[in-house]
Structures are given as C-alpha cells and as structure tokens.
C-alpha cells in the first residue's frame, strides 16, 4: 500500500478518469463543488453496466421486485425512520475563520484515535480530546468552538408552504418501507420477498473528500428482504453453502485486532457467526458480484460492526470491504439485520397497519381470562361514574386486572380503585387460526459509486508503459472498436458498415479512423475496450477481419458472417477469445 | 374525449396502476404528498424499457454521448442559466384560509381564458382578471391576496454553511452545459456532437395534480446537440427526409386555430417551417420513438410555441403532443433551438472560455487599420498626461477612432479630446487561420413519466370485458409467463426448469402456478405479458409447450429446444408470433 499522495493508484485513476471521461468533480467552471461528480460517457456506461449486474443477480435471477421512488420525502418519513434524530455528525467551527470541519475526522488525522474510537465518543469527549491534543484550525490555526451535531440530510420545502419540510433521502430503503403494504400485495401476500431500489441519494457531508468514495450525491442500491422471523430459513442456501467468506469478527475487533477467519457459509451459520440465513446468503451473492466486476476474492472481506458503529436500526451488521491502494480496506456494501425496526416505526408514526397475517398450519386453542364488571357492586361504589369506570375496565387487560387484584388487593384504572368484589372472572376457550406480525428485514446495500471506483482500480494495469483498463468483458463500457486499417480504397466504408452491423445487433461499438492503428489500439486499451476489429485489404477480398484482444494483445482472424453470433456468446462469457477465430502470430 | 372524471381512461389506468403496481402516489401511509409517485415492479420495468429505447435510438444508433450528473447544483449554475430569474409561476393566497394556488390555473378553470392567454399575463393583469371574474378561494370562498411570483425550484443548502444555496435541477440540460469543455474533448473536439442525460429532476409545483402528467419529482431525458451555426446541415437528414410530420404552426395558433398541416421533413425545411435541420431531424426521431412505444402517428403532432410560451432560452420551439382521453393533446417532448444562450451565459458568469476553435479551409487575409499616437503633437496638447492618454488611445478600436475623427472632427477617450493630428493610421495585413465561436444547441427533451403514461393509455384495451395491456413486445415489463397446467405429476418442476432456462437466457419471465390457467392468463394479460408458455402433460412426453399470444389469444405449439433462439428473434421484432410454432385451433 502506498501512502504517498500523488503516486498511487487513486491518483492515476483520477487522472485517467478526468482525461478519458469516466468521471470528474462537477461544476469545475464555477470552482467545483465538493462531493459532486459527473460521470462522462465511459463512466456513465460503466456504472450502468455495474447496476445492470446488480439487477441480473437480484432482480432477474432471484425474483427481487424493483421499484423507483422519489429522492425527496416529507419530514414525517425521516422522523419515523429515526434519521432526523440520528443522522448527524460532530461538526466543529474555527472561532477565528469560521471554517467548519468533521470533528471526528480531525481527531483521526491529528491524533492516534481510530475511527472505531471516535465513533463512540460523545460531543463532550470530542471537545476534551480536541483540547487535550491542542488541535487548532488547519486553515488559520485558530481555536475551535465546542463541537455540535450537524444533521447531514439536505433539507428543503415541498410546495408553497414553508412548514412543509422535506429531505433528500440518505438511503433508498425508506422508499420501500413506507410502501410496504402495496408491495406485499404485489408479492401476492407471501413471505419471504425482497424489494430493491437503485437510485440517487443525498448526504450533506460537512467536508467531503476522497473522490468517488465520499460523495454528497451518490447512487445507492438498497435491497430490503422481508421474512417471517419464525421461519428464518433461506430456501436458496444450498446454492451458496460451500462458498467461502473471509470475516473479521467484532470480538476480535473489540480487542483491536483485524485478524480474519475463512469459513464457508454453512460453517458461518453452524457456528452462529452470522445470525440470519438470509443475511449470509446475500453476503455470498455480494461476494459473487464483486468478483464478477473484477475484485479477486482475496481482496474482499466482511467486517462485523461493533455495537457503537452500527446504524441505529441494525442488530447484526457486516460491511463488505475491498482493499484499495490509497486507503486499505474500504466499505462497498453493508449487510444489516434491521429486524422489524423500520416497519414498526412507520406503523407507530403513521397509524397504518403494516402487519401481515399468517394462518397456523393447525389452529391453536387458547384459554382466555374474561372480565365482567359487577354493576351491583360498582353502582354503589362509583355512583354516577359507574358506567364510565366499567367501560374503562373493559378496555384493560383481564390478566393484568386479575394479577393486580391478587397481588395488591386492588387495581387502579385512571383514578378509580377497583376492588375484588367489583369484577367477575371467567375462562373462555377460543380457537386461534393465525396471527398478525411485523416481518423482519435483512438488508444488503451497495454504493454504486464505490463499486465504480473499485472496478476502475482493479481494471487498472500497466503493460509496456501503457495503461490498460482490463474491465471484465460483461461490464466494459465499450465492447468493440472498429478500425479501418487505412483511410482509403473503400476500407472506411467497409468499416462503417461493420460498425452499423454491430450496433444493430445491440453491441456497444465505437468507430475510430484517426491516427495510426497502433495509436487507435492504445486509445482503446485505455478506455477498456475488450475487442478491436480491424478492416484491412484482405477483408475486401475474403470477408474476414482481425480481432484483437485488449489484455493479451493476441489476434484472431474471423469471417464477418460468423461474428454476430460468436460475439454474442463471447460477451455472455460462454466462449473464450480463441474461439472467435484462427489465432494469428503477432509480429 | 370524455370529460367526466371517474369514467375515462385516466381513471381506469390509475386504478390498474395502483392495483397491479405500475405506479401510485407516494407516502400514502402519511396521507400522500402531491407530485410524488412510486413506480412499482411493473412500472419501474416499463419505465426502464422506455428509457432503454431512448438510449437505443440516440446513444447506440446515433452515437450521442450519455452522462450522469447530480440533481443538486449550486446557485451560480441556475443564476447563469436564467432559472433563478425566470423559473417562477404566479401564486395566489386566500386571505382567509391561507391556502395557496396557481393563479393561472384558477383563471383557466373558472373563466374562459386559455393557457395560451394566461401565459402572457402580468401579475397585475392576473389580479384584475381574478377580481373581474370574482374568483374566490375554492376551499373556503375567501378573498384572494394579490398574486406573487413563486420560484418553482427546490431550494437547499450545500454543506455546513447556510450561504451555500443549492437547487434541485429543474432540467438535466445544465449538467451538460456546465461540463461543455470536457465533453467537447471527449467528442475529440469535433462538431457536431450531442450529449444526453436521463435522470431525476425537480420542480416545486404549487399544487400538482394529474398523476404522472405533472410531478414535483420526475425523470427527464435532455439531449443537447452542439453544432456550428455556420454549418447547420444535418448529415443524417436523408434517413428521415420523407417522414411525415403533423404540425400546428404558431401563425395559426396566434389566430386561435389549432389547424394542423402534414408535411415531410424535407418540405418543412424547404418551406422554412422549421428553421434548423437538426431540430427537425430530432423531431422525426421523436415521432419514431412515440410510435415504437405504441402511440399511432395520427395521435401525435408538434405544435409551435408562441413567443410568450417559449422558455427564456429558446428561439424556435415545438412541443410534441400526444392525444389522451382526459385532457386532449398533452406535451411529451419539447424541441427547442436554444442557440448559444446557455453556453454564452455560463461563459459570462464563470469566466471560463467555452468557445471552440475552427480552422478555415483556406486562411483569410484581413486588412486591419492600426493606430499610432503622434507624441510630438500629443505632448504639447496633454502635457504630463500625454503618456496616459496615448495608452488609453491604444486600447480603443482603431476603426472607431478613425470613424469618429472623420465624422465629428474629434474623438473622446475618457475626458480627453483627440484631434486628427494626434494620430497616424496605417493599414496592416494579417492572415487569419480560423476563428473562435460558441456552438449552437438544438435540444430534444423528453419527460419519461409522461411517456410511461401515454404508453399505458395506448396499451389499454378491453376484450370480452377483460383488460389487456397491449404493450409493444420490445418494452413489455414482463416478457414471458410460465405456467404449469396443473400442480402435480412433475409439471411444476418442469415449469420451474423452463422458467430458469428463460431467466438464464436473459428474458424477463415470471412463474405462476396459482389458480386456474384461465385466471393466470387473465392476470398476465392485465400485466401486459406478451407471451404465456404452458407446460402440460404432452410436454412431459414430447418436450413441446403451448405458447399463447396476449393480444390475439392464439396459441402455437413449439419444441422447448427451439425456444431460446426463436424467442430472442421474437422480442427483437424479427419474427411474428406465427413463426414461433404450429398454430393450434383454440376451442
């Protein structure tokens, strides 16, 4: 790992990203605004392809439902979800120049206090640590004011009334929870089922840095998987149970160690390392996703979050991390067991019933204590208020009343003292056919932009002093380059025809006739184009073309007429490069 | 056209949309928030497929570059673009209940004043019209306060400083204009080129209604096409020149008529009805798009905007309209000639140079008048200030000085009076090799949500009292349903196998085993699934299946092994339903 800014992969990738148009900081002509990026043509396509992979794995193959809801939501939603109270970061302001900073980041930078430590510090503890370490403003050296909590949601007003506060969503999950009732109907009222949403989200970071890693506006893929906590079995587990996961457990982490263990999915469950079958199932799929976009398994791990690191809604939580050159291990996805936290909160806040009903396989007979007010005794005791007291009593739990009478000799309902002779108890038998409950939720959540970054970093290779972006062929932004060897004798027209054929077949193809063929190959390698098709004089006579491999620089010769089918198979990963034609000896 | 709410297609579609999960108003459990919708699984997929069609037509086939930028932008961007000044609507508030309304909408509803008329009214004129027509609050009957302008952008703060105002973008176009320099490089510094962005946008409507037609958060597809105004020819025109367009011209509209003419693209240019070749080219492509998503050409037209209806940046502007049951003609795309308005504005506001350079084919010789102060005369005339005056003079335009001296006998530079004998003129010849200029822009802009709505309305059919959503097969949210005829004898397993095969081939397929086969067909027809594959007892013995057509209810019998290839061709529109197998006689 290189710590020197200016010479690491992060720098190289940001340079190539700006130059070739993968991404860059937005609004440069206005001085740039931290935390916002613009994806250029190559980056936008790469990002779309990664998101298509997420859809393939979750929506197409697993039948997860996809929805699209809005970025702006009314205040009530985020009050209920707990974000208005919890989605805050400690901010500190210089008393001299008034510049503001993330207090915890300053501590991490200027002391030996780790992120794990700062995360559990109170404002008072942060204040003391700042003072103790004599940290002053990095801009002007001024003394800091005491830290405050800063709400990191973007706030706005919906419509013409200033009281109608809205926020930009910091996660796509709430757009799913608030629509649970409808979505449950669309899943034909059967558990388990999952809903995914991939869309923009907003976090008003105090001082964002680190390019794609920490953005104010980003794309999130939140998958909420709803299941019956009494039936937590994952019926798809057999597909992944022998998959190996690298885990760093909280037990070790609490002791300051980052030592990892390698266990299969099956072992992780047997040893109760991961508490939910669905959670570990999605962790295995997440590993598959990262591997397919180019991150080798040995550079992936899952770390279990410590109690104070977890989001306010989570019980057990694992972060999927990928090793990157500049920062070491960074989070690319989170895997939280959210229990019924969100649905229960929205149910309480909205008054809507978000329970589901399940019928027992065999109805259960239940004995129930039933209470009856004895009006003959209550009348004289409570006079004109007797009926009212009786009504209140009927609303109370019969069991509670009985217990209190037995234990204390009386039961208080509001200010009325109920005595044993005021009530009669009887026992009723009822047949209960099912029950209502709130489903539990396991959530895998991916950050698209970070996936783009790790894809770029793992695609980045240098060969003979030239940069190759070796994107896996299934996600390469441009699939095929088409090049006339020279710009005369009809080769350009033939190449244009070839290009049009490929485009009509649905391939992402670019046509390039500028500069020497070597320079065109080099440009394409840098843009990560897996295959180059060159039209030469032989093409004109025998209808064959040369196909060049971006990574090996090998070439095969192939008849044009076979290409559409062969290329379809190649980009679906069904055949190898050598299967595209006859291998040529490259001089 | 039906005007009765409750019995028209709009009502029917909103009902089916909510029930089957195409879309519904968001945040229902919190009472709903106007102007926000959630797309359920079917709607999200339909919307994606429509957006994929836009990408196919523009990005894949025409080579338009696609980018993705952020929804939030700093205030400077929208100051420069003119939105902070112009993006406003007249708002009126009831003096009694304080409820707020769009003043122009109230006038349209309660008087005979048309939208065309209200659009050009000043606040004072609106006030008078409200008073004259005695319009009072529709909620409480109260008197209205005078109307005000309401800025219909969502406002927020970026980062921890309250002065850093940001807005939610009301269009995706500005995200392209502000990044012009980089994008021009990515287009290899050649004109013409186009850039498209498809993403969420925000307009803080005062009182949104009309479902998908007027949203506060919506998806826009803005395409900015940059070209040299001195070379305005569209090299792709031949592909569309015989395409017929239905146009309602502003000349007619100004006279209150909506009479349409039908002209070919070629005629529209020859008769100078549309001023830009690229503009009319994109209008023809827009017609193709609408036709492909299911709107017949006779239900499409383009209306030319009247001067006061046009956006602040546009010279000529056409709206593409589609006829819908509830409201008649509604806009689905806009085609504006934005000239160099946006780039020039950002250039001025940011100080960045957004010009491009073009080399002349043959360098131009230019004669230039050069001015030289005659110090021997200026010294005595201006004394100590002579050098200063000479410097000022050198900064002035030589031609202006010459003209003024000739015409008036003197030239004023600041307060100094320059006489003919103070200066000498000479003529210099220079060779100019090229020039710098700001490209012009033609913009087609589509509203995704409205495209979804018109797709739904034109797909809606009733057959034998049942609803069929006849989506074109290229955009149907679910492509294939797979049904075991009965739930025993291994048919379910066989059907699951079939389903898995289709999913792995990349089809969107659903598996349904609940209820009678007739009910399953009906459910699938309503969800717009073009093909249903039924697994029956014959399948188990001979490996063939029945394929059912959603629209004709015809059935063919086909061997499973041929299906992947046949279905690929069918969904690409290369073969007909009858080509999928042997036609069966349906009882």
Image (tube, coloured by chain):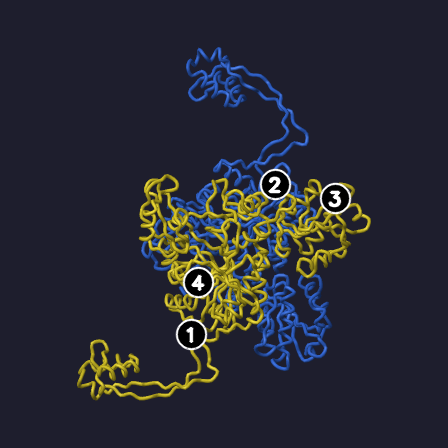
Chain colours: A blue, B yellow
Tell me if I can see residue A22 in this picture.
Answer: no
> Which mark is nearer the camera, 1 or 4?
4
Nearer the observer, A104 or A233: A233
Pointers 1 and 3 in contact (C-beta within 8 Å): no
The chain under label 2 reads A
Instruction: Tell me the residue that label 2 is attached to.
Output: A227
**Residue B487 x/y as whole percent:** 74, 41
Residue drawn at x 29%, y 87% as measured from the top left = B425
Ranked by sequence position, the earlier of labels 1 and 3 is 1
Instruction: Tell me the residue that label 3 is attached to.
Output: B485
Image height of A516 relative to A508, above or below: below
- In this view, the residue farthest toward the right is B541
Instruction: Tell me the residue that label 1 is attached to.
Output: B437
> Which mark is nearer the camera, 2 or 1?
1
Helix, strand or loop under label 4: helix
Helix, strand or loop under label 3: loop
The chain under label 3 reads B
Mark 2 to mark 1: distance in Å? Answer: 62 Å
**Residue B527 x/y as whole percent:** 62, 47
**Residue A447 x/y as whole percent:** 54, 54
């Amino acid at each position: 790992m290189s710590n020197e800014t200016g010479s690491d992969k992060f720098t190289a990738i940001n340079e190539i990203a700006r130059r070739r148009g993968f991404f860059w900081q937005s609004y440069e002509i206005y001085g740039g605004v931290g935390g916002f990026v613009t994806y250029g043509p190559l980056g936008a396509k790469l990002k779309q392809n990664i998101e298509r992979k997420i859809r393939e794995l979750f929506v197409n193959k697993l039948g997860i439902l996809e929805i699209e809801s809005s970025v702006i939501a009314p205040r009530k939603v985020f009050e209920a979800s707990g974000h208005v109270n919890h989605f805050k970061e400690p901010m500190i302001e210089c008393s001299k120049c008034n510049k503001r900073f993330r207090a915890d980041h300053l501590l991490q930078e200027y002391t030996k206090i780790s992120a794990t430590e700062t995360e559990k510090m109170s404002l008072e503890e942060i204040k003391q640590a700042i003072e103790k370490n004599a940290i002053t403003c990095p801009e002007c050296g001024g003394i800091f004011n005491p830290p405050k909590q800063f709400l990191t949601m973007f706030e706005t007003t919906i419509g013409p009334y200033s009281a109608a506060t809205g926020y930009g969503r910091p996660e796509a999950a709430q757009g799913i929870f608030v629509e649970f009732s409808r979505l449950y109907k669309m899943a034909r009222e059967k558990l388990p089922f999952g809903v995914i949403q991939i869309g923009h989200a907003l976090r008003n970071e105090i001082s964002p840095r680190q390019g794609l890693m920490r953005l104010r506006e980003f794309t999130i893929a939140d998958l909420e998987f709803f299941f019956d906590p009494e039936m937590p079995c994952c019926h798809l587990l057999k597909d992944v149970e022998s998959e190996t996961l690298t885990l760093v457990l909280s037990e070790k982490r609490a002791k300051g160690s980052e030592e990892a263990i390698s266990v299969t999915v099956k072992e992780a469950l047997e040893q109760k390392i991961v508490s939910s079958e669905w959670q570990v199932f999605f962790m295995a799929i997440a590993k598959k996703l990262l591997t397919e976009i180019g991150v080798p398994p040995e550079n992936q791990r899952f770390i279990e979050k410590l109690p104070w690191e977890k989001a306010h809604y989570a019980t057990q939580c694992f972060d999927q991390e990928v090793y990157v050159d500049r920062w070491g291990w960074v989070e690319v996805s989170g895997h939280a067991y959210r229990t019924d936290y969100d649905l229960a909160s929205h149910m309480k806040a909205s008054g809507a019933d978000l329970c589901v009903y399940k019928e027992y396989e065999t109805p259960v007979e239940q004995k129930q204590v039933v209470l009856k007010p004895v009006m003959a005794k209550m009348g004289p005791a409570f006079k004109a208020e007797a009926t009212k007291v009786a009504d209140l009593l009927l609303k109370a739990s019969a069991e509670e009343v009985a217990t209190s009478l037995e234990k204390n000799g009386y039961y208080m309902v509001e200010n009325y003292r109920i005595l044993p002779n005021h009530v009669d108890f009887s026992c009723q038998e009822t047949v209960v056919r099912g029950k209502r409950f709130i489903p539990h939720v396991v959530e895998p959540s991916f950050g698209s932009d970070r996936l783009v970054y790790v894809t770029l970093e793992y695609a980045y290779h240098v060969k003979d002093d030239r940069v190759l972006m070796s994107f896996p062929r299934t996600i390469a932004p441009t699939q095929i380059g088409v090049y006339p060897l020279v710009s005369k004798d009809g080769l350009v027209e033939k190449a244009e025809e070839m290009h049009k054929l490929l485009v009509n077949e649905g391939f992402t193809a670019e046509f390039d006739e500028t500069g020497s063929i070597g320079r065109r190959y080099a440009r394409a390698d840098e843009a990560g184009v897996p295959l180059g098709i060159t039209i030469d004089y032989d093409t004109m006579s025998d209808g064959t073309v040369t196909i060049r491999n971006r990574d090996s620089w090998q070439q095969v010769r192939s008849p044009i007429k076979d290409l559409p089918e062969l290329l379809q198979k190649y980009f679906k990963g069904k055949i190898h490069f050598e299967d595209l034609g006859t291998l040529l000896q490259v001089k």
